[in-house]
Structures are given as structure tokens and as C-alpha cells.
Image: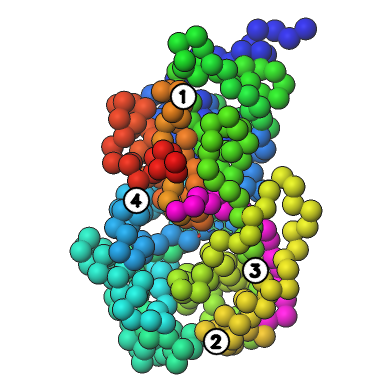
Amino acid sequence: MKTLSQTVSPKLDVLIIGGGIVGLSSAYWLSSNRKKVAVLDQADIPNFKAPSGDHMRAFYLTYGKDSFYTELARMSLPFWLKLNAESGQTIFSQTGFLDLANKTPGFETHSLETLKKMKIRAEWIDKKDLGREHAVFNAKALKGALFHPDGGFIWAQRALSLIASLAQKEGTLVNGRVKIVSLIEDKSGKLKGVKDSNGKIWTAENFIFTTGIWSPKILKNYRIPLRPTRQFQIYLKPPQNPGRFRLEHFSAFRLNSSGFCGFPMHVHGYMKLVDYKPGPLGDPDEEKSKAPPPSVEKKCRAFLKKHIPDIASYSESETSLCHFDATKDGDFIIDRLKKFPNAFIAAGFNGKGFSVSPAIGKILSDWILSGKPSLNLQRFRLSRFK
Ligand SMILES: Cc1cc2nc3c(=O)[nH]c(=O)nc-3n(C[C@H](O)[C@H](O)[C@H](O)COP(=O)(O)OP(=O)(O)OC[C@H]3O[C@@H](n4cnc5c(N)ncnc54)[C@H](O)[C@@H]3O)c2cc1C
């Protein structure tokens, strides 16, 4: 027979469902403010099958004219630097970030204007200087590049483990392998609790759903309009002179119009290339094959042939499949659930949620602590999809 503690959780201020980067960041801020918090995840934390459980995630402040996202990134930057300083580990490799431009004016020149207006450090590199300073890129195919030294990339799994342990030090309960299967409403219309797959009921004053691509499943009765898209990441070994691609000499880069973003070579000798253009729809729990269709490699080689010809002939490579939690308009969802004033959702990050997760966690935490969000979140409301 089950005892009471096996069936009902201790009284919590906030229960966070989803132990990815957004859930853990929220737990960090809430527990730093003395809230009694628990984070539950259906898998181990880090969940290597979820987007947060990857190796590396890019951090940049360049969003074209969109200063709102730049502001979220700017708010997040001190947190990533603080993790490095306080842990003595490299969580954030601040290599700088290079936005290659094949059209001017365009995304990169608009980003430069935004950064200048916001007094964020950035420099424009002319075509001829690009050929000299960043010789691995084929400057002939480009108009120039924007470099901002505050960018770089985050070692994602390390970040997740560290933030989980910091939240635990502040008293947060972090539990993997607890899958929430249903919601329990009380008579006043608030969310009273959630039930896990073992029948245990978890009660709290407030709930945050940071369940990423799985959000439409757990919140199936509450219309969460996001769809998982299939995204392939390619890891390739530079065929010659690999030293040039090490992070001491090579920064994370992107050519926004192509969708491609690349990372320096990591310890196992592989560089990562990701296509950020949303792929076809796919269910992460029902993928029969994780092998990419031939078109993925073809597109990758064509990009490299034009822009980094020295590695286009790579022969050693691996791929991995991951999913974006995509919304129709490409904007995030950060809102209360209409039905429950004490339940919040943060999802729909469209391939750009990791880098700004410290800001998202802080916003959710402030919202719960003060009763209103610290930033105007109109843009991210659920009702925009009607
Ligand atoms: C290929 C790819 C490249 C990307 N590159 C970048 C990048 O360079 N920079 C960047 O900033 N972002 C990037 N992103 C996006 C970023 O990884 C995500 O936005 C971010 O990790 C989302 O974090 P999350 O915490 O919202 O969700 P997730 O990481 O999806 O975590 C959700 C968690 O909820 C758990 N869960 C779900 N349902 C339940 C349930 N019923 N009960 C309990 N637990 C549950 C899951 O197990 C999972 O661990 C990329 C994404 C992909 C796919």
C-alpha cells in the first residue's frame, strides 16, 4: 500500500514541469528568492533527447531590427558570464560571434544599427578585411561581416547540470523520471495539482509548464499552437589543417539568409553545422529514423563549397536529429493559461530559446513573485493565434 507522501507531494510554492534550460533557469531565480520549488522531468536531467540536452548552443545579440530579442539576450549575458566566474568551468565560450553578410543592406547591417543604438560592442568587417582576418571563409561570395565580441556559444549540458545544482543548493527539489500525465482543477477554477504516471499528485500554489515540444501533449485541452519541426545537426571533421577551426582561432558564425550556423571544432575534433530554417513536421516520440534524407547533406555541402570551401570535401561526419518547438509567427509563447490564473507556460522558442533562457526564467520568476511580468509580454501571448 502507498503511504501519503508517496501519493501527495509536499506543499510547494511553484512546481515546474519540464527540466530543460527554461524550467531550470526559472527554478534558479525562484529559489534564489526563497520560494519552495520543485522541477520534474519525464527523463533524466539533462534529457539528451530534448533540445536543451545538446552539446552546444549559440549565443548572439544579433536579431536584425528586432531590438526586443536583443534586449532578452543582453539581459541574459551577465548570467552566462557569472556561471563561468562562479563555477571555474567554461560554460560560456565567449569567442565572439560572426554574422556573415551576402547582401547589404540586410539582416547584418540592420543588426549593426540595433547594436549601435543599444550601445553593444560590434564592428563591421569589410570584404577585403574578411579575406585577411577570417581566411577560411570565401570572401568573394560575401559582402562583409558583422562581428560582436560578446557572442559565442554555451556548453549546454554543462550549463544544465550546473544550474540544476545551484537551484538544488537553494532548496529546489529536482526530480528526473517523473512524467506528468494529467492536470487537476479545484472548485474555484485554479489548477490544484498535476498527476504523474505513478499516480502521485503534485500540488503547488503556482505551476510553470516548460515542456518544450511536448507542451501540446500535456496541455492537450488548452490549445497550445506549436508544432515540432525536424532539424538536423551535422558534425564534421575538417579534412585538413583542423587547427584553424579550433575556438582559439575560429568563432561561432552564421549566414542568416542561408539558415546555417556553425561552431568551432570541439574536443573530439568535430565542428557542428546547423540549418536553422524550420524543417518538416515530426513527432519527437515517434521518429522511426533519425537518419537525414540525402537532401540535408547536399544542402550542407553546397553551403560549405560556396562559403568554407576547405571543409566541403569532409569525409568523416555524424548527424543528430532534434526538434524546434515552432510557432506560426516565429515568436515565443510566454503567458498564463487562460483557464488557470496560477499556471504559466513558456515554450515556442523556435530554435533560439537556450541563449535567452536566463532572461525568460527571470521574467517568469518576477511574474510569480510580484503578480505581473517585468517586461511587456504582449508579443508572446497565447491569444495572438486566434
Ligand atoms: C537543432 C537545434 C539547434 C538549436 N540551436 C540553438 C542555438 O544555437 N541557440 C539557442 O539559443 N537555442 C537553440 N535551440 C533552441 C533551444 O535548444 C531551445 O529553445 C531550448 O533548449 C528550449 O528549452 P526548454 O527548457 O524550453 O525545453 P526542452 O529543452 O524541450 O525541455 C523540456 C523538458 O520537458 C520535459 N517534459 C516534457 N513533457 C513532460 C511531462 N509530461 N512531464 C515531465 N517532463 C516533461 C522534457 O523531457 C524536456 O526535458 C536549438 C534547438 C534545436 C532543436
Percent coordinates x, y for residue 324 in the rendering: 57, 53
- Three-letter residue code for mark 3: Ile
Query: Disc 3 versus disc 2: distance between alpha carbons?
Result: 17 Å
Going from the N terminus, do you reach mark 3 or mark 4 first?
4
Query: Disc 4 versus disc 2: distance between alpha carbons?
Result: 33 Å
Going from the N terminus, do you reach mark 4 or mark 1 first?
4
The circle on residue 182 is none
Q: In the image, which residues are magenta? A: 314-329
Label 1 C-beta lies within 8 Å of the nearest ligand 1 atom: no
Q: Nearer the viewer, residue 115 or 78?
A: 115
* Residue depicted at x 60% and y 50%: 228
Q: Which residue does the numbered mark 1 point to in the structure image?
A: 339
SS at mark 1 in the image = loop
Of badges 4 and 1, nearer the viewer stands 1
Label 2 C-beta lies within 8 Å of the nearest ligand 1 atom: no
Q: Is residue 327 magenta?
A: yes
Q: Which residue does the numbered mark 4 point to in the structure image?
A: 72
Query: Disc 3 versus disc 4: distance between alpha carbons?
Result: 28 Å
The circle on residue 234 is 3
Of badges 2 and 1, nearer the viewer stands 1
